[in-house]
Amino acid sequence: MSPHQGPYPGAPLTIANRFLKRYFVAGGVATLTALPARADWADVNLAEGVSELAREIYGMHMIMFWICMAIAVLTFGAMIFAMVRFRKSKGAVADTKLLHNARLEAAWTIVPVIILIAMAIPAVEKVVKIEDTSGSGLTVKVTGHQWYWQYEYLDTDVSFYSRLARSSDEARQKGSGVDPLSVDNYLLDVDKPLVIPTGVKVRVLLTSNDVIHAWWVREIGIKRDAIPGFINEMWISVDEEDPGTYRGQCTELCGADHAFMPIVVVAKPKEEFDAWLAEQKSAAATALAATE
């Protein structure tokens, strides 16, 4: 193709340039006008979370995000500038001295290594903190089943299964006549939630009875796989000032009803949790006595 021709025979390069400019301008305007119609950006980003660890993970994520954004802007900006300013149609000729400059090549090798090391140090610190379950005040064993969860409070007789709430289960059935939109927290509610105390480090032991599952609650910030024959370990917590209900899902494709395996965590103040646990212990003791 001649430098004075466009993308097809007989088309002047100026026409092609005008077409491309109009295309990119129109695309940019369409993108900007669509921004107000987009969902809240908080819904597509990581949650800041309701624990110190979750907030630290969020902070690290945002630091890495802006570093990557800065690198992308500099890199692609330089590429676009070079393609526009030094294109062949303007008679640009490659500078062989610049292409084989040893100092420049060393710089663009050493600088990324320094950036990676600077990013790795705080990231490793967070990973070490995530894996440190010492000092926990409560231990819960979580077992994944197809398609529900089992929670066992170790050193107590409290154990129960957590299944999809009946209202959601009925609404998802074909021909039920129940409108899913009329169901509160459709597919995100359970009959028995996991209850934990606020302000307490909770050690979680994860395993599975059948296939690989994954336990994840967005606001708590930790996700870990439940694997048959293995016990994975993690810890979670909720700040004292943030009691409430937090919802998540199994995030591993675990079978036909994978979408109907929600997780609900109810964080109660320490006194309320102690009362709840005492009530559960009493109910478990009564049920055990009835079977003897």
Image (spheres, rainbow, N blue to C red):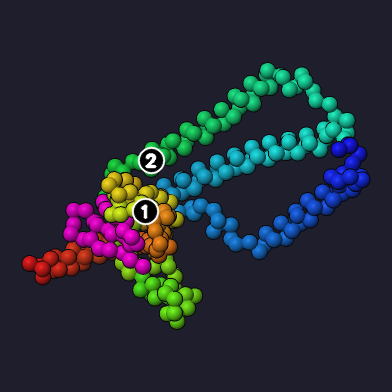
In this picture, is 198 found above or below 122?
A: below
Mark 1, residues whose alpha carbon is within 10 Å: few (<14), some, or many (≥20)? many
- Residue 30 location in percent, x, y? 74, 58
Query: Does residue 241 appear anywhere in the picture?
Result: no
- Residue 26 location in percent, x, y? 79, 56
Q: Earlier in the sequence, mark 1 or mark 2?
A: 2
Furthest residue in direction bottom, as rendered? 177
| Residue at figure coordinates x 24%, y 56% from the top left | 153
Q: Secondary structure at mark 1?
A: strand
Numbered label tally: 2
In this picture, is 73 found above or below 173?
A: above
The residue where tag 2 is placed is 129
Quadrant (top left, top right, bottom left, bottom right) of the C terminus: bottom left
| Residue at figure coordinates x 39%, y 56% from the top left | 254
The residue where tag 1 is placed is 213
- Residue 37 location in percent, x, y? 66, 64
In this picture, is 157 found above or below 233?
A: below
Furthest residue in direction front, as rendered? 9
**Three-letter residue code for mark 1:** His
* Camera-nearest residue between 234 and 138: 234
| Residue at figure coordinates x 13%, y 69% from the top left | 286
